Amino acid sequence: MQTTNEYNRKRYRLGLWFVAPAVFVLLIVLAYPIFASLVLSFLRVRFAGQGLSFEFNGLNNYADLFRKDLFREALFRSVYYTVIEVVSVILLALLVALMLNHPLGRSAFYRVVLLVPWALAPVANAVLWKWIYNANYGILNQALRGLGAIEENIIWLGKPWLALNMILVADIWKAVPFIALLILAGLQNIPSYLYKAARLDGANAWQQFVHITLPGIKTTFVISIVLQSIWALKVFDLIYVLTKGSPADSTVLLNYLSWRETFSNLDIGYGAAIANVLFALMLMLALVYIRALRPRQTQAQGG
Amino acid sequence: MPIIQRFLTRFFIRFGLITFTLLALGPVIWAVVTSLLPLSSLTSHPIDLNPANVTVENYFLVFASSRGLVSGLINSLIIATFTSAVGLVIGSMAAYALARLNMPNSSRILMMILATQMFPGIVIVIPLFLVMSRTGLVDTHFGLIIVYLSFILPIVIWILKGFFESVPMELERAAAVDGASPFQTFRYIVLPISLPPLFATGVFAFIEAWNEFFFAIILTRIHVKTASIAIAEFSGQYQTLYGQMLASAVLASIPVVALAIIFRRFILEGFVEGAIKA
Amino acid sequence: MNSNRLVNRISRRDFLKLAGAGAASVALANFLASCAPKSDGGTLNVLVPAAPDPAPPGVGQFSLDAFEQWKKNNGFEVTYEAPPWPQLHDKMAANFASGQYVHDIIYMSGWVPEFADYLIDFADELPADIIADLPPSSFSTLTWGGKRLGVIFTLSLLTMFYNKEMLDGIGVKEAPKTWDELKGVAKELTGGGKYGWVLNYGAPEGIGGVASYWMCFLQQAGGKLYDDKGQPSFNNAAGVDSLQCMVDLMEFTDPGSLSYVGINDATNVFAAGQAAMMMNWPFMWKPANDPATSKVVGKVNAAVLPAGPAGTASIDGTDAYTITSLSPNPEGARKLIEFYLDAEVQKRQVLDTGWLPIRLSVLNDPEVQAAAPNAAVVLEQAKNPYDSYVTPDYNAVTTAIGVEIQKALAGTQSAADSIKNASDQVIEIVKKRG
């Protein structure tokens, strides 16, 4: 008993040493900026000739925020964008992963194909899509016209909802590979004897999918949803390159609005307030995630 | 009937795989085509794909111009290598501690680690820049590496923690009975059987550090310009040199794709173990 | 149980320690502020955009030998930082926010009033012969609080570019001279997948955004953005008519224009021969006559912008060099700017990169006029108003106006409503300026 205790104490001490470097890096790099971004949102910040000048502004930045239509629209669009992106990415990634897990799709070729969109530098990716979507000479319009699918050029980035959805398409294309990889890994980790047993019990393909496959990748799903939600809410570079928020601010999402206020209009306090709303959104999502995981953990402990 | 069903299934899967390949590679192929043709051919109606116009001039120009794509690639290589290596070492340690070393409140710590990723970079970057410029870390490899570490550590920790939890407890108990210290158990039992997920998260960290742009542009000046910045320099206010930009993007993607090809086995196996048992 | 509780307590204490270490490191960071990098006086740090955007010798490929010679003669090293143009303003904002010396010379485009407190007034110290050789009006967008905070190095006003061949095709020999002629010619040239007009209306803000384009039309209609007291003064007939002219033109405009974010997208359409006319910066002359990028080589001509009720008018691209107030060596910085304005350097600037000079003597040089036939047109354009109305909140103002203009151009709102909404928002912004 004593040796076990001693051993456990050793493990605990080692644990502290093991967690310390990572926590230290996160603290030293991010503690001050995160603290500052919380504080800045209560200040009015001006560019004053020698650095910045600060003035306490109470809750005014937040009050301004919720008074403005643009903020409410951006909030709504960010939620729309995130929901569509997460649902599409997860479903497409699941589809891709199922195909790549099928004996026909198990070649190394497809696995490398999967990684190519992920490897392309995001700066170039954004410009590439702008080039593809160009209303006049872009390959998308030219190809569709060549196929006879359209007669007039479509202004992909010139109509409010269409532009937002085209940005989504580009983003989804870039995001599917990583999530597909995660899900593929999840699929491969499901013990094959489970399927064999199910087949012996006379389960058809759909029943196997619902009762074995889906529960088997549930954890992967939840991790994917949380990571993808965070990334979707943070979307910035595609908007910056493709539309700059146009037409008529219809592709302004929260993170872009935060950039515009912070860097373009130099209203750092206001930009920080927007960013903090974004943080609150993500935190809420993550708490939902914890709740989704909790029953499993209780089960595991109980069993 | 089952034969028809089987045939149909195979048909749809083949069709799906071809569609997937076309959709995944299409835009990239168009990037390559763009880098090989003069702008005047590409903006024509209809697009002039005459192979006679194919030129590698853009690739020459990329290297000839003073934009520093080569030094950008070297800088990115240094930064991405260190970030992924250091990230793996301290990330795996933290993940192991949180998974197995009886850390109290480990789920709360994990949540806080993830929460650091929820603050948009746009608002973080100015305070970060102020601290870094006062400590002389702007435009240094070290500065960028430590910042990228803070971005990739949470994800590395989350993935690896899942893996370490799936390592059978019996293995570790057996090691303890044999008199191994907890550190020895980690070093000689857990790590060696965890090579696949370590590679996998390493590649993830490498790609993220290789491609990052927004922090790189603010936190560097002259000496540590990364490949992403060199690529972005072709996109200006008055003129965007699409051909040269995509040529340099293709060149900058090659090391990453090569890495993916080399480590593809590890990537897949790695996530198999790592992502699931969280 | 007991040991478990102990473990919990220890962990909290240890984590407080860790947090303390984090706080200590931040304090250390502040302490190290005193160790910030200083210039040794022999190096000039210069922030400019990457070429082919307007860049000085050493970043742009011109006058390289003269530049080496200048550095040797004056005993200076020059370190360029040349990020992509779209990231310049972000970098500047971060640098200025730090309150530390980073650069001696900074390229600016419409941002002088915004950063006026960080810049010095050095125009008076420039040699008289240089000052006398610059268009006096070139200082107007660089003057804030009565100080001239920079010097323009390229005459960059919007003028008209048109495809001679396409205009000839409908029997029109000269560029349209009035709004009505412009609309008429554009109408005739539209059809069969080609358009009379193309421009980038996709970005609302800044110089080169849709709001700045409208300012050309506004001044052509005899309007002004601000009155003498600095209050918005465009919610009137001139404001509405100028926007209505742009709206009328939309029918004959490449509809993609609403989605083009950068002028480059529109230039490509023009250079492919898909649109007959556009407004553009003088720089456009060179790429439009380069066979690698253009299908309209030799078919391009330039003209002053069509006149509205009050005549022709344009806006200024305001590409300028400024000196920061934290520069330890403003003298040296000024000397380097004088080198950039040297007549020979200015001449190579236009011949090798296509960016026009600012010095009148160089603009009138026969060799320059032969290589850049549009130089004379820009000089002619410069005899008319070309105010860009830059203010410290220029980005906010132009975003507000630009978004309303986009609504009118897309046909979802009348020109009158757009102008009224824009005016209301600018009044708010000006009030906030205080």
Image (spheres, coloured by chain):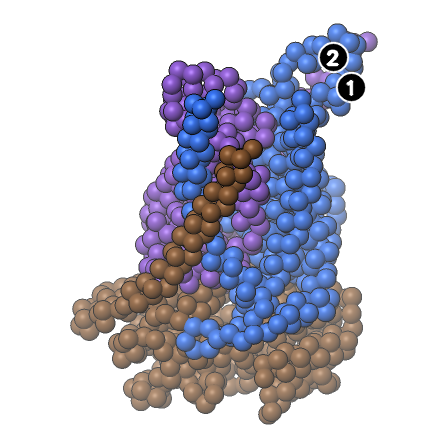
Chain colours: A blue, B purple, C brown
- Residue A208 appears left or right of C123: right
Query: x and y percent of residue A103 in the render?
Result: 62, 16
Residue C153: x and y in percent read 39, 75
Can you identify the residue that label 1 sits on? Answer: A207
Where is B45 relative to C35, above or below? above
What is the chain identity of the residue bearing mark 2? A
- Are the residues tagged 1 and 2 within 8 Å (C-beta)? yes
> What residue appears at the point 66 percent right and 67 percent down from the top-left corner?
A62
Q: Chain of mark 1?
A: A
Is residue B253 in sight in this rendering?
no
Identify residue for label 2: A198
Going by the numbered disc 2, the residue's amino acid type is: Ala
| SS for dot 2 | helix
Report the residue at 56% width, 40% height from top: B105
State the count of labels: 2
Residue placed furthest toward the right: B1
Of callouts 1 and 2, the N-terminal one: 2
Q: Position of residue C380 (x, y in %)?
A: 50, 82
